[in-house]
Amino acid sequence: MKILLNCYYTKEHTKIQKNYFPTGLLSLAAYSSKRLQGISITILDGPLEINDIVSCKPDLLGIMLASPLFSIGCQTIQAIKMKYPGLPIILGGYHITYLPENLPGDCEIGVLGEGEETFFQLLKLMMEKGCFPSTELKKIKGIVYWDGVFLRQNEQRAPMLLQEDIPILTNHEICTFKYVRPIAYHVVASRGCPHRCLFCTSSPFWNGVSYASIAAVVTQIEHLIETYHPSGIHFLDDLLIANKPFLVSLHNEIISRKINKKTSFGCWATGAHFNDEIARLLLEMNFSFLGFAIESGSPSIYRELKGSWNSPEKNARAIKLARAFGFYVSVSTIVGAPSETVADLKKTCTYLKSLPFCDGIVQPLKAYPGTRLWERAKSKNLVPVRIKDWSIIEREDILHNDTLFYAEKASREDVHSCLNKIKSIYRKKRIWSFVIRKINKIYSLFVGGESVGNNGYRDRFCLFLLLCFYSIL
């Protein structure tokens, strides 16, 4: 049986500038392939078209469809179903999990939540019966499906696979990218997040945190290194450093296998979990990049968005520490929170100017299905009751009246102005970081030794080059 899995997106509907292996679909494929004989799974990353069905000739089509792409994705599904009415189509992902009532009539089934075991059961049924009889579908947990004209939703499946059942992903070769772009390599060591932010879709999806075995994680890293020779691998975990014992075990295995000599790493970090000891562990593993989701410089707005487990003060202390250790630090910021005032927006700008990070991104607050913000926005009638074009939830032109907007104490003009100021701050930080890196390279070439910021001779050398730079300008 031939199965085609698709991670659906288009260039017009994504900001991503690189290709990312869809680890969720790779995991589905690895889990089922280990348990079933006679199946062939191919993954297509990018826009799905009729020609892909023609060339692949699948017996079953599975699509991972995100909320902002749901409307355009459903149009594609409708076109495929018109040409291939007998082709079973299964949907998966956050959107259908949170809004199972959105399952389009052209799809037989929607997989809710973690999908490996559910997808395996569906493939097993398909192989046994050649179709999906509703009398059999009602026995499978974790799905929504059409029973004639009626939409049925079954009992949810247990939310987390056992550690020994989490697939080891060494099957990247089954994935084809529609766009020719640089590839960013990553691994996922944990599923879920220990915290529940106002706007996050991940934590309610997983409702907890589970970890793959250290052996499985390291095996995947070695596979990527041996197959693709990446200069860097990013841990896509929501918060890898939150579990110190796991991090220590990962550190020990990476060092013992000398993987730190073969590539560098990056991950997300946060002030509440980052300290001198964690920094040293990461450095020894050859981590060079850290991302901090600082969101806001206003303590009250930070609590509204993220909770009380962390704070702008802790993030500031962690970022300064990370830069002192030599990490390349990127930050992300959100503006337009419901309670955010003009004074809060100004606090964030002042806060960002005081931090020594290297790069950053900023965006207006967005409500996605499944989040606490989504429920709050619905209760206040800030999102349409019926959404025909789901791309509206990601629009960023907040001066346009049709763009969804959640701030209650600041105007669209206030938030837009703050967005531009933060982008300007990021641009200056990016340029300054670039100059410092170039100075470090020059220092290393002509003088040798450590980078800028570690001794008096180097600092004077840095000052000399900066004066030359400004004199040229």
Image: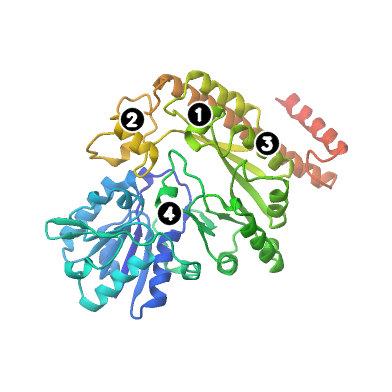
Depth check, mark 3 against mark 4: the one in front is 4
The foreground one among 90 and 406 is: 406
Find numbered disc 4 in the image and state the secondary structure of the residue it sits on. Answer: helix
Q: Earlier in the sequence, mark 3 or mark 2?
A: 3
Residue under label 2:
403
Label 3, label 4: how far apart the Cα atoms are: 30 Å
- Which comes sooner in the sequence, label 2 or label 1? 1
Which of the 4 image quarters holds residue 116? Answer: bottom left
Rendering quarter of residue 308? top right
Picture coordinates of residue 165, whole percent (x, y): 46, 70
Residue in front for this viewpoint, 415 or 237: 237
Question: Relative to the observer, which residue lies in front, 447 or 163?
Answer: 163
Identify whether 418 is placed above or below 372: above
Q: Amino acid at mark 1?
A: Ile
Estimate how packed mark 2 is, as few (under 14), some (14 to 19) or many (20 or more) residues with alpha carbons within 10 Å: some
Left or right of 51, for residue 350: right
Q: Residue 166: where, in percent of width, then height?
A: 47, 67
The residue under label 1 is: 301
Sequence-wise first label, 3 or 1? 1
Q: Residue furthest left?
A: 149
SS for dot 3 = helix
> Please, what is the three-letter code of the amino acid marked with disc 4?
Trp
**Residue holding disc 4:** 206
Q: Mark 3 highlights which residue? A: 317
* SS for callout 2: loop
Q: Earlier in the sequence, mark 3 or mark 4?
A: 4
